[in-house]
Amino acid sequence: MGLTMTEKILAMHSGKDEVKPGDIVDVEIDVRVARDFGGANVVKNINENDLNIHDPSKTFFTFDTNPTGSDQKYATNQQICRVFARDHGIKVYDINAGIGTHLIIDEGLVYPGTTAISTDSHANILGAVGAFGQGMGDRDIAVAWSTGKVWFKVPATVKLNLTGQFPEGIFAKDIVLNLLSEFGANRLLGYSIEMAGEAIETLSLDERITISSMATEMGAINIIFPPNEKIIQYCKERSGKEPLVTGPDENAAYDKVINIDVGKFIIRVSKPGKPHDTVGITKTGKTKIDSAFLGSCTNGRIEDMRIAAKVLKGRKVAPGVVFKIVPSTNSVWDQCLEEGIILTFKKAGALVSNAGCAGCAAGQVGQNGPGEITVSTGNRNFPGKQGKGEVYLASPAVIAASAVAGYITTPDKIPAEPAVFKPSEKLERIKKAKEAKLLFDKPTSVEGRIWLIDFDNIDTDMIFHNKYLTITDFNEMGQYTFDNLKGYEDFAGMAEKGDIVITGKNFGSGSSRQQAVDCFKSLGVQIILAKSFGAIYERNAINAAFPILVYKSLDKLSIKDGDKIHVNFETGMIKNLENGKSTITNPFSDVQMEIYQNGGLF
């Protein structure tokens, strides 16, 4: 059988004629990116492990999460990266450049058939040009910087065949929200999604970017488009290179082929809390808004700006509504200036910021406060992601129309007079929000009795043996924890809710089974501390909102089995409550904390 697009790219970059789903391959990475988000940790990993840079010409920093430098921690991280870049001949796309995943497309660093990784979880956006991109943690990035390669498990591919014609008023954001409505956050979990059908042929690069960027919210590895002639030409002009892959083999083998009639698509909005919880816009009931946001890697391109400007032309943002606009790159910003779009935005009463990720990354304009209702073009609206208020996701057309109307609506239904808040309305909403117990108020420190299991390479079969893999009931999993670990066969019977496990290197190596994480949650274990974790296990634990921390040394604590300790996720401080001794280890990363506070990836 032939290969899908993703399989062709991974085979080509691992020196193989073919690969199949489930294969673990060492993939050569053409473009290796660290952002200001996670970049300093990449530097730390490189320095602490005495690693070299494999190829500086393929290695980049992109400062996109806080291009205003408004946060001292981000400013410090950026400077750490700048110094490292100067010392190693690494190019920096600094705070004046924009979103890294967009830059590497527009700069011709990626083109059809290439590979790229970034500390950006939306690096799979590169599927828009037929490239393979993945977001990874700082350890993976550091290894790739040093070796030029990273291991990857070849995913199975689902082919989505889009047929028919899109109805009037349907934009790219509506397309992906309709797909999310169909497949949710986990029906296509772990799949590579390959787009096909006559309906995709007319999609522009900007539209493909919007759709590919939300593969993460669907739980997919990527959404990849076979590039048409326009995309190929665009990439050739910028890279000066011919595409490596332009489509799947004719006899490619897919795990599933799903036909979708796009003629049935409707204008959709994601309700607060879950990107996949979408409804037709008529069901939002003219929800009043406090703010609107246009931007992010999903909808910050020039076409998005033009759509919004067309709606805003000759209109004003509603009283009491703040409209924040952030182009994805400086080039888009300049184009908006040249076309008079910036002037249209300003005359309408919108705030236009410099290019970057904006509110999505909590480092720029776009955040909202308790009780605030925002309608946004972002890709995520998890509680706490874009502030402490509620966030609806929608297309640029809906965002602009809503900003003018004062409530969620479409361009054809903007009222002659905008909705106006009564003075007490917002105050009442803020009061209720402050009183509510929000999901992101989860504790950031724990105390408990420790199990000191001083072994390295405890694999997933030792943790949760494969003979129990048919067990899917979470409540039944705990009883089998460490059932196959010599000396700890009775762990499950002796462990108590609130216990803490401390172990050695490479904990959780082996298979990808989620039960090896969930069994500890089922038992009530609060956190696992290890010198290192198996890569898949680490991702599984973080995505399941199960606390794990990596420590370098606990010698200062003078701990013994059964001691009670205190662990702070935010600071990395670990204190032995028996003797008062303490030490500092790496705290939760921003991504880990975000997922933990959200209660899991979904």
Image (cartoon, rainbow, N blue to C red):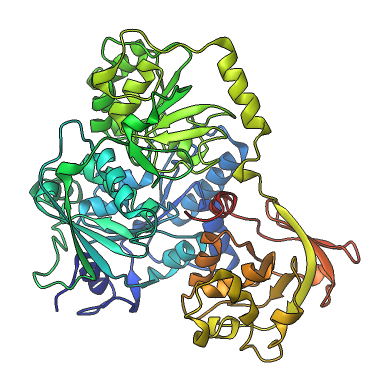
Give the percent coordinates (x, y) of residue 332.
29, 31
Determine whether, in the image, residue 369 is placed left or right of residue 108. right
In this rendering, does residue 533 appear at all?
A: no
Badge count:
0
Determine whether, in the image, residue 568 is placed left or right of residue 339. right
Is the N terminus in the top left, top right, bottom left or bottom right quadrant?
Answer: bottom left
Q: Residue at the location (66% across, 78% down)?
A: 504
Q: Residue at the location (28% across, 53% down)?
A: 126
Q: Residue at the location (53% across, 56% down)?
A: 600
Pick whichever, 406 or 342, lies toward us. 406
In this rendering, does residue 413 appear at all?
A: yes
Give the percent coordinates (x, y) of residue 20.
26, 78
Pick whichever, 519 or 348, lies toward us. 519
Determine whether, in the image, residue 501 is placed left or right of residue 197. right
User: As displayed, is residue 375 above or below residue 277?
Assistant: above
**Which residue of the protein is positioned furthest toward the right in this rendering?**
579
Give the percent coordinates (x, y) of residue 486.
67, 91
Give the percent coordinates (x, y) of residue 501.
71, 72
User: As displayed, is residue 310 above or below residue 150?
Assistant: above
Pick whichever, 288 or 25, lies toward us. 288
Pick whichever, 472 or 400, lies toward us. 472
